[in-house]
Image (tube, helix red, strand yellow):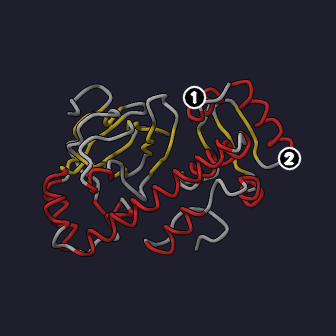
Amino acid sequence: MLQRTSDVQIGDQSPPLTANLLLKRLDAADRTLIERHAEALNARVGAVLFEAGQALEHVYFPVDTMVALENFGRVEVAIAGREGMAGWTALGGFNHSPYRAVVRWRDGWVLRVPIEPLLGALSTRVQLRWVLTQFAIVSAVQMAEGVGAHLHHRLDAAIVRWLLLRHDRVGGDWIRAHHQEIADNLGARRASVTDCLHIIEGEQHVRCRRGRILIRDRTALEMRAMGAYGTAESLYRASLGDFGKGANAN
């Protein structure tokens, strides 16, 4: 159970549910049900919302930050911003998460909703079930794309994918990132990440500054990802609505 700590505080004020695009997609009746149980958390970067193997009691909807799912080795397997949620495995009846959920990018708001009333509503509320199930499928596809990059030992594709996933979820073209952070998230050596970024920067696709990376040529990065990025985002747009900054985004 998540405890009130210096990293996670229960907010005195709650952001609107519609600030999360997945919740915005629900009809008014479903949002009212969610709002009845939702609790706003003000979370710092690095805050752990739940651990791998821990019994799940809530699902989490980011509002203005990101939540990464990481395996036991702390390698990132998926990420969600205000377009999605974390803890969706509980919707399929899995009481324990195979991954830990960690707040990334910046301090921000996360809405948490108890699983029990949510599961109770899924049997009768068709749109609620459809929306959450669609996002679970999108997340599974996102994970599969990441696996593909690692299986083919394409560190450059994995780095580009990491950048694109975050670029979709930030307001502009600058991404807060340190080389060590990227290396940790990808399970790679920092020196190898730095070498790859130097090559990508030399090709004018990004500009690296201390603690920040500027996306200069989004189209070129998508091409360089070579199948490690794009399918999940296209699926999201086809089923749940506009999202991201990709070539096919509205």
Residue 234: x %, y % from top left:
56, 68
Residue labelled with disc 1: 184
Q: Residue furthest toward the right?
A: 202
Q: Residues within 10 Å of mark 1 (few under 14, many from 20)?
A: some
Q: Nearer the viewer, mark 2 or mark 1?
A: 1
- Place residue 119 in its image quadrant: bottom left
Q: Position of residue 111 (x, y in %)?
A: 28, 49
Q: CA distance from mark 2 to mark 1?
A: 24 Å
Q: Are marks 2 and 1 in contact (CB under 8 Å)?
A: no
Q: Residue 220 versus residue 214: which sits nearer the camera?
A: 220
Residue picked out by circle 2: 203
The location of residue 106, given as percent across then percent down, is 46, 39
Of helix, strand and loop, which one carries label 2?
loop
Q: Quadrant of the C terminus?
A: bottom right
Locate residue 126 relative to residue 64 in the image: left or right. left
**Residue plotted at (63% across, 64% down):** 246
Which residue is at the front of the view, 124 or 206? 124
Tag 1: amino acid? Asp
> Horizontally, is 221 left or right of 96 in the view?
right
As shown in the figure, which amino acid type bears the numbered disc 2? Glu
> In the rendered structure, which disc, 2 or 1, sits on the residue that comes first in sequence?
1
Q: From the viewer's side, name the closer residue of 180 and 69.
A: 69
Could you tell me which residue is drawn at 62 percent across and 61 percent down?
230
User: Would residue 46 be found to the left or right of residue 42 on screen?
Assistant: right
Left or right for 52, reference 221: left
Q: Which numbered tag is attached to residue 12? A: none
Which residue is depicted at the point 34% across and 37% down? Answer: 43
Q: Is residue 175 above or below residue 29?
A: above
Q: Which image quarter is the N terminus in?
A: top left
Residue drawn at (43%, 41%) of the image = 69
